[in-house]
Amino acid sequence: MTVAEVDLSILVSNLASIRRRVGGRKVMAAVKADAYGHGLEAVGRRLEKAGVDYLAVAFVEEGVRLRRAGVKIPVLVLTALEDEGEAVRQGLTVTVYSERVVPRLERAASGLRRKVRVHLDVDTGMGRIGVPPDQALAVAKRILASDHLVLEGVYTHFSASDDPKDPYTARQLRVFREVLESWRREGLPRPLVHAANSGAVMHVPESWFDMVRPGIALYGYGPGQDPFPGVRPVLSWRTEVFHLKTVTRRTGIGYGHTYTAAPGRMIATLPVGYADGYNRLLSNRGTVLVKGRPVPVVGRVSMDQITVDVTGIGGVEVGTEVTLIGGRGEARVTAADLARLCGTIPYEVLCGIGRRVRRVYVG
Ligand SMILES: *Cc1c(COP(=O)(O)O)cnc(C)c1O
């Protein structure tokens, strides 16, 4: 059986650590994509209990799931507004990422005789979504003139804040400040201002404003090459040996026989594969922990199984626990290690842990 164990007490301690770092500013926790694979409802509920100020999801549907799970605190929808009626009904806060969102929301909110809180996203250089800086003031005025929209916040998103040496973040920040300054000059009420993702929480104190918006740091990882100070990984991923053999002659292992076990090698088969998010690029490259010792993945990762060489590890039998992500000290495998081997980032490794893998909550 394969499980992803999510230690919610570590999540809470990471939140506290981030809060201390930003001097008690408000925290909006990014819980999109099933809380980076950790489980949306459980993570959202625990963060609410721990006093987080805001949650951020990508889609309305994720916000609805949080409401159904009993989460009462504000939830900001960051991305495409796929169902504005549902957003209004569930009391979600909506991102105005384009002027076009305004009339859609107005129609939905007036039809339901409700008000809807919005945050205006200014595209200071990420280049995906958001209102261009030179239109931000006009869109803000349009929102302020509406009877049904409440302009609660304004934000931007950094494209390179994970790299402290990249000067682009300072440029984006300058553009954002100019927008805020133009609002002030025009006498617009100052809404909640936020910009900092984990990278900016780590490297750019000038970007912290009223609230920060970390995701990956809450789950215990840094956004770039360096670990985020003061946080620990929340998730560990474990499975167990379900088949074991000592080969008696040269034996090809797995699809394509990309590995041949010499006589006497002990090969353990584990019930996890790329369908569970154990990336196929880890074929003949990954390391897992057995009895606290690192052992290599041998042969190809297949959809539902991987094979590891446990020769020389005493006491391995069917049912022996194997750690895919977790452990401590020297004998530790992190999502960042697996990401490096796959040429990706820990975000993708965590989000990629499949639905077949049961989430178990402790702490
Ligand atoms: C995902 C996301 C975040 C969090 O980013 P991390 O790098 O995980 O800290 C913050 N803001 C927006 C708009 C996002 O989409």
Image (cartoon, rainbow, N blue to C red):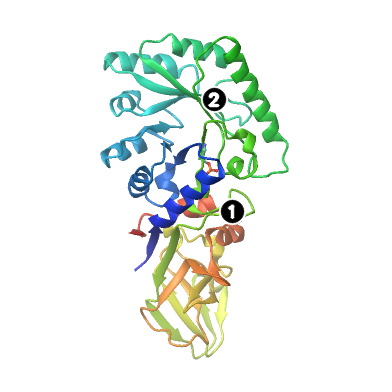
Identify the residue at horizontal 51%, vertical 36% (top origin): 25
Pick the quarter of the image with the C terminus: bottom left
Give the amino acid type for the residue marked by disc 1 in the picture.
Pro
Give the amino acid type for the residue marked by disc 2 in the picture.
Gly
The x and y percentages for residue 92 are 35, 29
Identify the residue at horizontal 37%, vertical 32% (top origin): 74
Instruction: Left or right? Give the position of 75 relative to 329.
Output: left
Instruction: Kindly indicate the quadrant of the structure image that contains residue 258.
Output: bottom right
The x and y percentages for residue 316 are 43, 84
According to the image, label 2 marks what residue?
A: 130
Q: Nearer the viewer, residue 277 or 92?
A: 92
Mark 1 C-beta closer than 8 Å to ligand 1: no
Identify the residue at horizontal 39%, vertical 84% (top origin): 317
Count residues near mark 2 (Cα–Cα under 10 Å), then give few for <14, some for 14-19, many for 20+: many
Instruction: Left or right? Give the position of 106 relative to 187.
Output: left
According to the image, label 1 marks what residue?
A: 229
Position above or below: 340 against 137: below
Position above or below: 270 against 109: below
Q: Nearer the viewer, residue 8 or 308?
A: 8
Tell me how far mark 2 sits from mark 1, CA to CA.
30 Å
For label 2, the SS is loop
For label 1, the SS is loop
